[in-house]
Image (cartoon, rainbow, N blue to C red):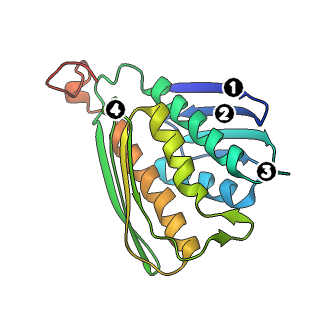
Amino acid sequence: MRVSEINRKTAETDIKLRLNLDGEGKSKIDTGCGFLDHMLTLFASHGRFDLTVKCKGDMNVDAHHTTEDIGICLGKAFAEAVGDKKGINRYGSMILPMDEALILAAVDLSGRAYLGCTLDLPSPRVGDFDTELVEEFWYGFVREAKCSLHIKKFDGKNTHHIIEGAFKAAGRALRAAVAIDERFADQVPSTKGVL
């Protein structure tokens, strides 16, 4: 089974995270931030990943450390769970409509970290969540997952819809990227022979 458990404790956050790449989309999320809980639940559901996240963070300050550190832990979990990458598709993409929003997510599990995030969010907040933290989450994720991830807004006016579309699209793109192609189950999907 492609499963990873990450425990990370700092002066700012204490995170326990469990990821099963070959799950059913079941999740149990408790980050201390309702909007982030919602996004991670959607991410797991659309990725068909089983995901458990428990975070105690310095929410008395704001959600920055919690959001970034969960991104870091989730990226580590992906890198660990995917292992040597033999047999995976490597690439995945999704163009996802979320009401008036239209979002692209494209990923390459290349072993190289890069984030291209052009969401152009109209509102600085959704509820009590600072929307600039969306990009911080994905920066943390790509650094540890060692992947190239592009998230792009083609259309959208409602900030909640845009962010929701991004998490759903990223989940679906990653689901495609980590899927096993049985025809090449013993091969790494690179002409270099390593990712």
Cα distance between the residues tagged 2 and 3: 14 Å
Q: Name the residue under label 2.
A: 17
Numbered tag placed on residue 32 in the rendering? 3
User: Secondary structure beneath disc 4?
Assistant: loop
User: Secondary structure beneath disc 1?
Assistant: strand
Q: Which residue occupies 54% across, 79% down?
A: 158
Cα distance between the residues tagged 1 and 2: 6 Å
Task: Specify which label sits upstream in the sequence, 4 or 2.
Answer: 2
Q: Position of residue 69 (x, y in %)?
A: 64, 39
Assess whether mark 2 and mark 4 are in contact (beta carbons under 8 angstroms): no
Q: Name, please, the residue furthest toward the left.
A: 191
Q: Which of 136 and 33 is in front in this view?
A: 136
How packed mark 3 is, by other alpha carbons closer than 10 Å (few <14, some 14-19, many 20 or more), is: some
Q: Where is residue 92 in the image (x, y as percent from the top left)?
A: 31, 47
Cα distance between the residues tagged 1 and 3: 17 Å
Q: Which residue occupies 19% across, 27% down?
A: 190
Type of amino acid under label 4: Arg
Decide if residue 89 is on the left or right side of residue 121: left
Question: Which dot, 4 or 2, sits closer to the camera?
Answer: 4
Cα distance between the residues tagged 3 and 4: 31 Å
Assess whether mark 2 and mark 1 are in contact (beta carbons under 8 angstroms): yes
Cα distance between the residues tagged 1 and 4: 23 Å
Q: Where is residue 61 in the image (x, y as percent from the top left)?
A: 81, 51
Cα distance between the residues tagged 4 and 2: 23 Å
